[in-house]
Amino acid sequence: MRKILLCATAAAAMIACNNGNGTRGGGQADSVLNKAFQAYQERFIDQLWKENPDWATGVGYHKYDSVLIVPDSAAAQASLAFVQQQLDSLKSYEPGKLTDANQIDYQLIENYLKSVQWSIKELKSNEWDPSSFNVSNTFAFILNENYAPLETRLRAFSARLGNVPAYYEAAKKQIKDPVPELTSLAADQNNGGLSVFEKDFADSLQKTSIGADEKKAMIARAQTAVKAIKDYAAWLKTLKPANPRSFRLGQPLYDQKFNYSIQSSFSATQIYDSAVARKAFVHGEMAKISRQLWPKYFGSQPVPADSLELISRMIDTLSLKHVKPEEFQSAIEKQLPELIAFIKEKDLLYIDPSKPLVVRKEPAYMAGVAGASISAPGPYDKGGNTYYNVGSLEGWPKDKAESYLREYNHYILQILDIHEAIPGHYTQLVYANQSPSLIKSLMGNGAMIEGWAVYTEQMMLENGYGNNEPEMWLMWYKWNLRAVCNTILDYSVHVKNMSREDAIHLLTKEAFQQQAEAEGKWKRVSVTSVQLTSYYTGYKEIIDLREAYKQKMGKEYSLKAFNEKFLSYGSAPVKYIRQLMLK
């Protein structure tokens, strides 16, 4: 899922002084060229939204809300023409003569364009991933976000509906030998979004003064769209391709996707090797803590000789402390003010109090990929809501719910809130939209975003969160092992053909995850690729950078200054932020 970036204003003056917009060392930047490049960026963004109206709506640019592009071969050719035109335009600007900030923007634009080109020509996921065809998300956004009068939004919603039947007819023509797991996901997610058209749209219409005849026509259009969505979902369930594509990406495509998506200074193989080494280190630290805690929880019982068994028994014991299923969301809501208070007390970084975070049940059209996520408005929509989406346990069998809650126990739930909300994703995204560069906000790097969230977990505990209890540290290592094993799992499955049995063993026996969590992760790795490596990659690069920055600053080093300076560059790849912070 695309994590949309959001805005804040209170810290803008503080952020602006560290945005990296100065000229290159030695005064080599060409001011005329830089002005021309900034003018080009504006033209590029204008064209980008014409090509990607859904993306535009999601980031708060609403000129094209009424447009739904039909994903046929003509649309693909139009995208390739756009990419080539923009790549040709980029050749007019010599990167070495641009400011540091503009160089990063140049690289982000170029990477985006080449990634689109590669996706259409080589990845060709439109042929084997039916879940890439789903209109619900943008329609729901238009309906739920109060960026314009309700009647204006409903008329844009209605205009978009006109292309829904053609959209799904084009989707059917694109799909060849689809991946079974992605076919099932596509049916579930498209059916999950039907209430947006069947109920929510009609309910919203009743709140307006739109005339009866117009309302009737709009509802009829929605009903036609509903039929197209249902037909697509039903069509998917009837598909029985003779040679269905494996969900495993394979090394050549995986390496290329990693390079475009992660934009790391390391290769996919190097990150995998690093993760394997990190797993061994974390196991050692967890064994030490478990031996320390053993007498407290097991008295004089013999300590298991096998270190993984020792760790597992200690974690199983601690995991019994958790909330009730019906209290899961409310526990998250109660935790957020405590995190803010701790950050203020320790003076770790500035938190903007004007941007509340709304905890909500995960919408049905988003279900099936992750149990918790952040949805936030973009840089054009500063007043929009930021949502913390929490997966519901309603209707779960008792044993499955218990397994899930042991995974997200008393300790882990706090770390989850740090990661997803404060000072993790939510806080980072507030800062990101204050970057003067729209490109950095729009083309946020997933590894930087996820890496920051993982880094903040460690940063909070290093500063005493959880009162330095060994129980909290043990559980954090377990959680950190999750990021590490995400990388090992993703690479092993998509490149090394790891079996489901071996994957579950890795997650349950070596990462100490509950069975329900491990099975959910297997489902996730079977419908996504590369994204799971972003957590550890970004974390490793940020930790490495913090150490290098600390050595550079010497006695002048400040953790708060590091955190705020790092965040001030927007969601740029860590390798580019590193270049600027260590200059």
Image (cartoon, grey):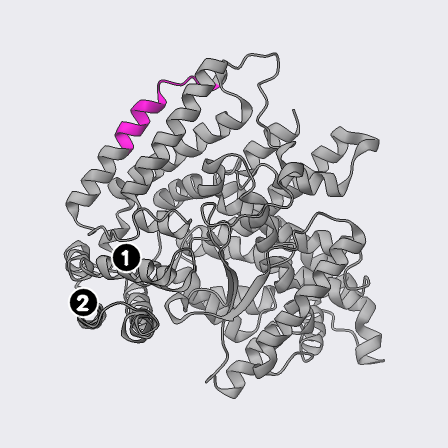
- Kindly identify the residue that appears in the image at 34 percent across and 30 percent down: 43
Give above or below for 144 relative to 492.
below
Which of pointers 1 and 2 lies earlier in the amino acid sequence? 1
- Residue 273: in sight, yes or no? no
Give above or below for 395 relative to 239.
below
Identify which residue, 368 or 329, lies in the foreground. 329
- Kindly identify the residue that appears in the image at 67 percent across and 43 percent down: 543
Q: On residue 221, which mark appears?
A: 2
Image quarter in which the C terminus is found: top right
168 vs 579, left or right, is left
SS for callout 1: helix
**Mark 1 vs mark 2, CA separation in Å:** 12 Å
Q: Position of residue 502 (x, y in %)?
A: 48, 65
- Residue 54: in sight, yes or no? yes
Q: On residue 32, which mark appears?
A: none
Q: Where is residue 329 in the image (x, y as percent from the top left)?
A: 58, 74
Q: Position of residue 254 (x, y in %)?
A: 39, 46
Q: In which quarter of the image is residue 311?
A: bottom right
Boundaries of the magenta span: 83-95
What residue sits right under mark 1 in the picture?
A: 156
Identify which residue, 73 or 13, lies in the foreground. 13
* Residue kind at label 1, given as amino acid type: Ala
* Prevailing secondary structure class for the magenta stretch in the rendered image: helix
Q: Position of residue 444 (x, y in %)?
A: 48, 43
SS for callout 2: helix
Identify which residue, 158 or 2, lies in the foreground. 158
Give above or below for 34 relative to 81.
above
Is the C-beta separation of discs 1 and 2 under 8 Å? no
